[in-house]
Image: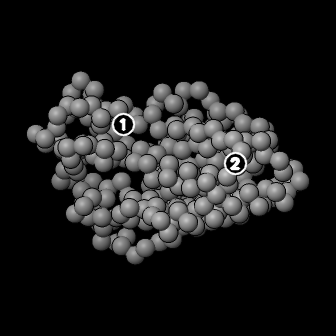
């Protein structure tokens, strides 16, 4: 197939999914690439359109084994026409359950033809210096594999005469999907006196949960526990307070120490 350009889409509050998608694009080495960072709310207003002469790459983090619920409306609104697509999910070294299959189903329903899929590991959103969970991932080893995956996608595309010749991509997972993608409201962020009200946390929040006029105020009913504000704070003034999320991070730290490797499907 002759692919005129690549459209690379990612939702990446802590920049791990962004790193994975950028690695795939480097491996593909396309003539033209258009990037759609849909992390911020204002980037999820206009629907995406793609044609059969483009390759669409979509990357999302895994939330409770599923595609994040807040992305459902935007993803389902994608308008495609026999567009070859690469489905990518990024998880924090625990499990990705049905997220990859769910993403593939969503894109298929929008008119895409999934040609490849990947489940990669990124540093968990609850990871900290005290309790590292998949710390620093994707790392250099991951990125070598991810770039090689990009090259294999390019080879597969070159061997297919047209989009209607793309076969069914077999991916792990179950239908109906397990788990609930909705985030349970949790007031879990502590803000110390080190906060300077710089506003960076409000800027990086993917759901606008932090008051830009008073960074100590976070709307727990809107927050998706992505920890982007914690990881972006230059003063390290934000942390996970004792409670359910802290207990969960302790369990993950204890149970998810064995390194998992990326999985690729072509």
* Residue 136 appears anywhere in the view: yes
Name the residue at the left extreme: 193
Depth check, front residue: 115 or 242: 115
Q: Residues within 10 Å of mark 2 (few under 14, many from 20)?
A: some
Against 72, is 147 above or below?
A: below
Which quarter of the figure is the C terminus placed in? bottom right
Relative to residue 143, is residue 8 drawn left or right?
right
* Label 1–label 2 contact, CB within 8 A: no
Q: What residue occupies the far top of the structure in this picture? A: 213
The residue indicated by pointer 1 is 205
Q: What's the residue at 63%, 38% (across, down)?
A: 34
In this rendering, position of residue 178 left or right of residue 191:
right
Residue for point 34% across, 39% down: 223
In front: 234, or 179? 234
Q: Is residue 116 above or below residue 43?
A: below
What's the distance in space between the residues labelled 1 and 2, CA to CA? Answer: 31 Å
Q: Residue at x 89, y 53 (%)?
A: 161
Q: Is residue 219 visible?
A: no
Give the percent coordinates (x, y) of residue 136.
38, 61
Numbered badge on residue 30 = 2
* Left or right of residue 32, residue 262 in this image: left
Q: Secondary structure at mark 1?
A: loop
- Which residue corresponds to the image point at 75% horizontal and 48% vertical from the top-left? 84
Q: What residue occupies the far right of the structure in this picture?
A: 161
Of tags 1 and 2, the one toward the viewer is 2
> Which quarter of the figure has residue 204?
top left
Mark with earlier residue (1, 2): 2
């Amino acid at each position: 197939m002759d692919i005129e350009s690549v459209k690379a889409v990612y939702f990446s509050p802590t920049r791990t999914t962004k790193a994975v998608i950028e690695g795939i694009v480097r491996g593909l080495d396309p003539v033209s690439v258009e990037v759609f960072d849909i992390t911020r709310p204002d980037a999820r207003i206009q629907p995406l359109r793609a044609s059969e002469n483009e390759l669409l790459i979509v990357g999302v983090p895994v939330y409770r084994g599923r595609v994040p619920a807040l992305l459902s409306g935007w993803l389902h609104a994608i308008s495609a026409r026999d567009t070859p697509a690469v489905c990518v999910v990024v998880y924090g070294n625990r499990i990705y359950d049905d997220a990859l299959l769910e993403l593939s189903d969503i894109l298929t329903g929008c008119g895409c033809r999934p040609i490849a899929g990947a489940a990669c590991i990124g540093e968990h959103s609850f990871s900290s210096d005290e309790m590292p969970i998949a710390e620093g991932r994707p790392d250099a080893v991951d990125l070598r594999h991810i770039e090689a995956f990009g090259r294999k996608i390019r080879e597969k595309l070159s061997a297919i005469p047209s989009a209607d010749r793309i076969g069914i991509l077999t991916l792990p997972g179950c239908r109906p999907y397990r788990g609930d993608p909705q985030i349970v409201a949790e007031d879990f962020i502590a803000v110390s006196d080190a906060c300077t009200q710089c506003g960076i946390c409000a800027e990086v929040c993917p759901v606008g949960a932090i008051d830009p006029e008073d960074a100590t105020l976070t709307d727990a009913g809107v927050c998706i526990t992505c920890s982007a504000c914690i990881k972006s704070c230059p003063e390290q003034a934000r942390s996970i307070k004792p409670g359910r999320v802290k207990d969960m991070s302790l369990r993950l730290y204890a149970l998810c120490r064995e390194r998992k490797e990326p999985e690729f499907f072509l």
